[in-house]
Image (cartoon, helix red, strand yellow):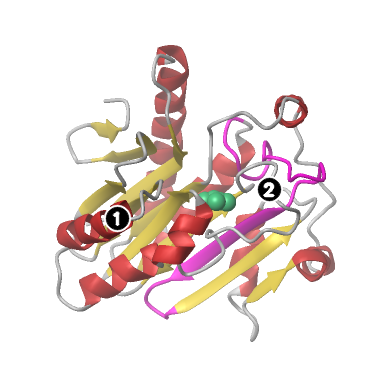
Amino acid sequence: MEKLIIHGGAGSLEGKTAEAQKMHESLCKIWEESFEVLQKSSAEEAVLHAVRMLEDDPYYNAGTGSKLQADGQVRMSAALMDGYNNRFSGVINVQNIQHPIEAAALLSAEKHTVLSADQATGYCRKNGFPEYNPITDFRMQEYENKCIGTNGTVGAVALDKSGQIFAGTSTGGIGCEMPGRVSDSPTVAGTYASRKAGVSCTGIGEAITQQAAAAKVVIRVGDGMSLQDAVARTMLESDDYNYSYGLISLDSKGHIEVGTTKALTDVYYAYHDGQKFSTFFS
Ligand code: GLY
């Protein structure tokens, strides 16, 4: 019973029907391709495939098309969590590579599984990641216009036929942040999985980190709460602080849940319920 859910960030597309339609189509296409990978291969390969595709689409704020930090530099972060082996790996503020999620995946085989900044970039170079400029004209203009823009972080969570769950998240941050800011994505607050559940978050990183959101949902499921209740309880707790974020999740039984706090309009998610696509747009 393979399951896959992906997201392309969070925000509000109110009144922008054409943009919402475009994102819906893009997410459905990425989901379809990645689900084929899941059926033929594993949850790990499916998550990597989905996140790579999302990183390659300049529309999303991850990989190519990442937002610029306040000093005009792009610094990207990504994490991968292997729920079966309880293995979290990630890169924080890595620069000039095409696929931060690949760097996170490579680090999962190392003794030290999370690297940051110049050392993360150096690790990528040492391992053959070519120099790559992820800055797009659109993001440059957005930066020059004081960073107005809504598209965020990307992520995927998959359950494969052997019962393994993987979660992956990749981000260019929130745009115009203090150089070196660490987002939630490369931490267990933004990306977490176990043998019971997996979560990838999107939204304001500080809120997600302060709530330990992804880890909290997964641990609650591990303690016996249903996924639906675990997500609802976590969102409710965050509403006490008016936090703005959302998450995608699934559990080992194949249930899928999307959570949003009250302060957030939408998580741009997509999954297939066996009958039809369910997305933020339909
Ligand atoms: N959730 C992405 C960020 O805050 O950077």
In the image, the residue with mark 2 has its CB under 8 Å from the nearest atom of ligand 1: yes
Q: Which residue is mark 2?
A: 177
Secondary structure under tag 2 reads loop
Report the amino acid beneath label 1: Asp
Q: Which residue is mark 1?
A: 240
Looking at the image, is 24 positioned above or below residue 9?
A: above
Q: Nearer the viewer, residue 139 or 126?
A: 139
Q: Is residue 18 visible?
A: yes
- What is the C-alpha distance between the residues marked 2 and 1? 25 Å
Looking at the image, is 56 positioned above or below residue 41?
A: above
Q: Is residue 162 visible?
A: no
Q: Residue at x 29, y 66 (%)?
A: 217
Report the amino acid beneath label 2: Glu
In the picture, measured across the screen, residue 135 lies left or right of residue 246, that is: right
Mark 2 and 1 residues: CB-CB less than 8 Å, in contact? no
Quick one: label 1, few (<14), some, or many (20+) residues within 10 Å? Answer: few
* Percent coordinates x, y for residue 125 in the rendering: 83, 63
* Farthest-out residue, bottom: 111
Secondary structure under tag 1 reads loop
Quick one: label 2, few (<14), some, or many (20+) residues within 10 Å? Answer: some
Q: In the rendered image, which quarter is residue 211 located in?
A: bottom left
Q: Residue at x 36, y 54 (%)?
A: 241
Residue 61 belongs to the span the image colors magenta: yes
Q: Nearer the viewer, residue 110 or 62?
A: 62
Looking at the image, is 137 positioned above or below residue 160?
A: above
Work out whether mark 2 precedes mark 1 in sequence or the reverse, and give the earlier one: 2
Q: Residue at x 64, y 69 (%)?
A: 106
* Farthest-out residue, front: 241
In the picture, measured across the screen, residue 239 lies left or right of residue 57, that is: left
Foreground label between 2 and 1: 1
Span highlighted in magenta in the image: 59-86
